[in-house]
Amino acid sequence: MDLSVRKPLAPVYLLYGTQDYLIRLVKKNIVREALSDEERDFNFSSYDMLEVPIESALEDAETVPFMGEKRVVLIENPFFLTAEKAKTKVDQDLKRFEQYIEQPSPDTVLLIEAHYEKLDKRKKLVKSLEKKAQVYELSKLTDSTVYHLMEKVAAKYGAVYTKDGHEQLISSVGPHLTQLANEVGKCALYCGPDRPIDSRAVLEIGSRSLETNVFLLVNKVMQKKTADALHLLHELVRMKEEPLKLLALLERQFRIVYQVAYYRDAGYTQSSIAGKIGVHPYAVKLAAEQSRLYNADVLKRALEKCAETDYRIKTGREDKLLALEMLIHYISSAVSA
């Protein structure tokens, strides 16, 4: 995915998709290329289409820049590019907008920021934008693109970002770019230029998602570290995590381990297994390591025991926390030697 912004700048840019971080990144790059810091006070303006008519933005776009070569006009929440029905009392003159797209001002960069998964490509306005504007569809990302983006975040702090650290961070916080970038920034400040951001550094300083804590809980159970597992369980409960939710995540992790072991033994690769069961490849790698501690029969019994525990809690036959403690004791004792 090419996220670069080059001069000469296009008169109209359309940024749309579900990756808010990327939209903000490309928008920032466009504005930086168009205007100096001093020019932004005079030649940058934004208009929310839920609150103001498009004519206001277009009138601004047709105004000559003040003390500069370019003017940047940002259009936010262009709901009329989608099939959605927005709650707004503002009537939008889309024909006027279409006319501007056909003949945009050469002195203005019109920037359309659309945080929507899909645009309604049946609409004449959308078709015009696809033909006339510089369009960035910012939704789907490959893992290598995410890695290189986070490499750049780390580099801003003078730190070195490693594949090992990236995989651990993805496992810890998920593939959400804004959260990833925040965590990479924290790790970069912690490591500095002398220590690489590797998996150990991520575990030392990075935030852990609930799913990661559950993964660690399962790991401790599988390694027969029952006391450590119970300590982590009580820690999660103290953090106000609902026991039934923890049980559901435990069951999910055991199911992932079971599926990974099954497909691995059937000859599937790590990436193909990830596609089949719908998880990140690094999660498959970790589950494969866990599966070596269990055989298929034990995993089946663990899943059955999770279902039985769920039933006993929901029918009021057993206290939630006590039931989880008993489940951990049971599965720990069933681990293959």
Image (tube, rainbow, N blue to C red):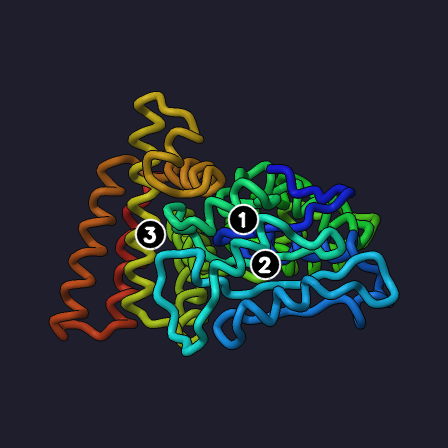
Quadrant of the snapshot with the N terminus: top right
In 3D space, how far apart are the residues under numbered discs 3 and 1 (Cα atoms)? 27 Å
Does residue 153 appear to the left or right of 247 in the view shown?
Answer: right
Q: Label 3's element?
A: helix
Viewer-closest of 246 and 234:
246
Tell me the residue at 75%/42% (across/down).
6
Q: Which amino acid, by three-letter code, is at mark 2?
A: Thr
Task: Please tell me the numbered disc located at residue 170.
Answer: 1
Instruction: Name above or below for residue 9 compared with residue 76.
Output: above
In 3D space, how far apart are the residues under numbered discs 1 and 2 (Cα atoms)? 12 Å
Task: Please tell me the numbered disc located at residue 13.
Answer: none
Q: Which amino acid, by three-letter code, is at mark 1?
A: Ile
- Can residue 236 be spotted in the picture? yes
Tell me the residue at 43%/61% (across/down).
80
- The residue that disc 2 covers is 178
Q: Which amino acid, by three-letter code, is at mark 3?
A: Ser
Question: Which of the 4 image quarters holds residue 296?
Answer: top left
- The residue that disc 3 covers is 332
Instruction: Name above or below for residue 40 compared with residue 223.
Output: below
Tell me the residue at 47%/61% (across/down).
94
